[in-house]
Amino acid sequence: MRHRNNTLTEQELEIMKIVWSREEATVRDVYETLLERRKVAYTTVMTMMKILEQKGHLKKRADDKAYVYRPAKPKAAVIKNMVRDFVERVFNGSAEPLVMHLVEERHLSDDEITEIERLLRARRRV
């Protein structure tokens, strides 16, 4: 039996980033923010937010004239689960190939390398 994939699609993640940054938002708020970047239908945004609610990523409450949505889960927890799922699916659960790829292909800055080294040293002390 296949496990339920709770990973966000690209469009869902785009919506969640807006809601996380605002802490709460109506469909209109999200629609207008997305419209600044690209053409999108209001009904598409509404449908996507309903799907995110069904998936357990958003909670809503009735306001005067519209539902107000807020994140059901903290951004860090969602990203952690998405990364864990990605590493499991792509690298069979091993993070080493992912880290090696990032180091070799992403041309990390000196600051990024220093931060990774700091995190590794802190991890060894635990």
Image: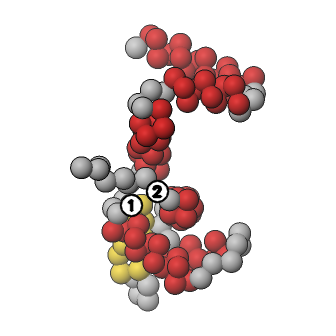
Work out whether residue 1 or residue 98 is closer to the camera in this orientation and state it. Answer: 1
Q: Secondary structure at mark 1?
A: loop
Residue 118 on image: x %, y %: 59, 18
Could you tell me which residue is drawn at 56 percent across and 73 percent down? 30
Left or right: 28 with respect to 65? right
- Image position of 61 with respect to 65: above or below: above
* Amino acid on which disc 2 is placed: Leu
Residue 13 on image: x %, y %: 52, 58
Work out which quarter of the rendered image holds the C terminus and state it: top left
Residue 72 on image: x %, y %: 36, 59
Could you tell me which residue is drawn at 55 percent across and 30 percent down? 98
Dot 1 or dot 2, earlier in sequence: 2
Disc nearest the viewer among 1 and 2: 2
Decide: few, some or many residues near mark 2? Use Cα within 10 Å; few <14, some 14-19, many ≥20.
some
Q: Is residue 22 visible?
A: no
Residue 117 on image: x %, y %: 61, 17
Which colouring convention does the figure follow?
Answer: secondary structure
Left or right: 58 with respect to 104? left
- Image position of 123 with respect to 99: above or below: above
The disc at residue 109 is none
Work out whether residue 47 or residue 22 is closer to the camera in this orientation and state it. Answer: 47
Could you tell me which residue is drawn at 33 percent across and 62 percent down? 56
Residue tagged 2: 8
Q: Is residue 118 visible?
A: yes
- Image position of 88 with respect to 38: above or below: above
Residue tagged 1: 57
Work out whether residue 60 or residue 90 is closer to the camera in this orientation and state it. Answer: 90
Number of dots carrying numbers: 2
* Amino acid on which disc 1 is placed: His
Q: Tell me whether circle 1 and circle 2 mark residues in contact (CB < 8 Å).
A: yes
Work out whether residue 39 or residue 118 is closer to the camera in this orientation and state it. Answer: 39
